[in-house]
Amino acid sequence: MKYLSCFVFVIIFLSGCGREATGPQALVVGMELAYPPFEMTDEKGEPSGVSVEMANALAENLERPLEIRNMSFDGLIPALKTGSIDLIISSMTATEERAQSIDFSDPYLHTELSLLTSKGSGVETVADLNQEGRVVVVKLGTTGDVYAKAHLDKATLRVLDKENACVMEVVQGKADAFLFDQLSVYQNAQRHPDTTEAKLSSFQRESWAIGIRQGDDELKAQVNEFLEVFRSEGGFEELGEKYLGEFQKGFRELGIPFVFDPPVPGK
């Protein structure tokens, strides 16, 4: 009995040591590192950008190590639902359709759907696109994709899986317009001023939020608490100045609320 007692004690001791050595479980965040300046890689190939810094701050707040998994945008929700990742922080719009299969945090950013048009196309508003002969390009799985399929049934729709590929369709005159968020449209029009135009008048308001697996109420509460504190301490303002400073002035001169500004009532 003496030897058996010692054996049991050793097993319990080693088990306890193993748990201590493991430490806090990593917070696994999924994002597509192909959407600068929000999700991208730096010169060393390491994750970088607004969403990456948000994820780091959140993991630090939760006292958990961070693991970022880079994956295609349309694969993020399936990965969350199957438990491959804990959260989605990837410039994802919180939509009613997505909310049927995952939960969302409180919104952290407000933007609007707009148009990158081919110069000389004659397209001024989204209504101009819903006619035969018009070609519209969208990125797979985005709200632009959903909107076009629901409202632009008379146009020819091209669905591609990369933002840059969509932009080049417009730049090369192969498509009349690309439906995407205001900041991206503004950026791409600045990069291609001779061939494209930004039509920033909104036809659909959107809010970005963090995707959370349904039923994970404790983590959802922790994320919302973090977002409230992060905003009150100027975290979003700092990220805006660091990554988006060159665009803030242009947006505000046009009377368009900047991405981290509160939404304008009635707009």
Image (spheres, rainbow, N blue to C red):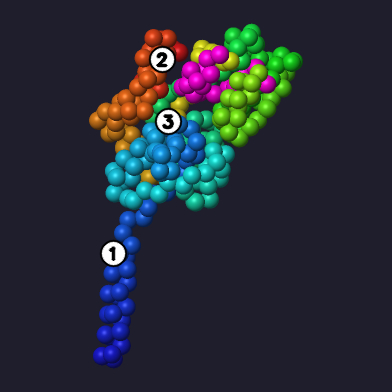
- Secondary structure at badge 3 equals loop
Instruction: Answer left or right for 97 relative to 11.
Output: right
- Whole-angstrom CA distance, mark 3 to mark 2, is 16 Å
* For residue 257, above or below residue 64: above
Q: Is residue 249 visible?
A: yes
Residue 20: give its label.
1
Q: Nearer the viewer, mark 1 or mark 3?
A: 3
Q: Is residue 211 visible?
A: no
Task: Say what amino acid the circle numbered 2 marks.
Answer: Phe
Q: Residue at x 50, y 39 (%)?
A: 32
Instruction: Answer left or right for 185 relative to 218.
Output: right
Does the magenta run of residues contain 249? no
Name the residue that disc number 3 marks.
37
Q: Sequence-wise, which precedes: disc 1 or disc 3?
A: 1
Q: What residue range appears in magenta?
A: 174-194
Q: Sequence-wise, which precedes: disc 3 or disc 2?
A: 3
Task: Say what amino acid the circle numbered 1 marks.
Answer: Glu
Name the residue that disc number 2 marks.
251
Residue 68: give its label.
none
